[in-house]
Image (cartoon, rainbow, N blue to C red):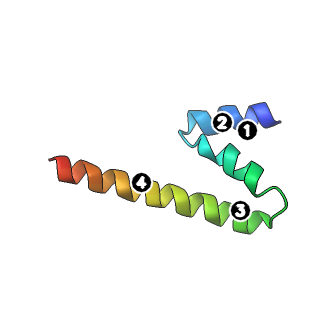
Amino acid sequence: MNTALSDICRQLRLAYIVETKNEWNNSNPTELIESILSADLEGRRRAKLGKSEQA
């Protein structure tokens, strides 16, 4: 299962999720999902800002 999750996350370019899941092993699943998605949104926002500054 862990390998399958790692492969899926890598294909979605969300490889850090597996690492985050391991850190939050005993947490509420809803909190884990919110944390992961918030981190992804922040990363995308930063990447978008970086691209607009380069233009």
Identify the residue at image location x=57%, y=43%.
14
Q: Residue at x 80, y 67 (%)?
A: 28
Look at the numbered discs 4 and 1 and tell me whether their residues touch, using CB distance below 8 Å: no
Indicate which disc, 4 or 1, sits on the residue closer to the N terminus. 1
Q: Are marks 2 and 1 in contact (CB under 8 Å)?
A: yes
Q: Which residue lies under the disc numbered 2?
A: 8
Is 14 displayed left or right of 50 in the figure?
Answer: right
Residue shown at the point (85%, 61%) measured from the top left: 26
**Gap between marks 3 and 2 measured at Cα:** 17 Å
Q: With 26 as the anchor, is 20 left or right in this view?
A: left
Image quadrant in which you'd find residue 23: bottom right
What residue is shown with label 3? 32
* Distance from the alpha carbon under mark 3 to that under mark 1: 15 Å
Q: Within 10 Å of the Cα at label 3, are there few (<14), some (14-19), or many (20+) other Cα atoms?
A: some
Q: Are marks 4 and 2 in contact (CB under 8 Å)?
A: no
- Report the number of numbered marks: 4
Label annotation for residue 24:
none
Taking the view exactly as shown, the residue that stands out farthest to the front is 23
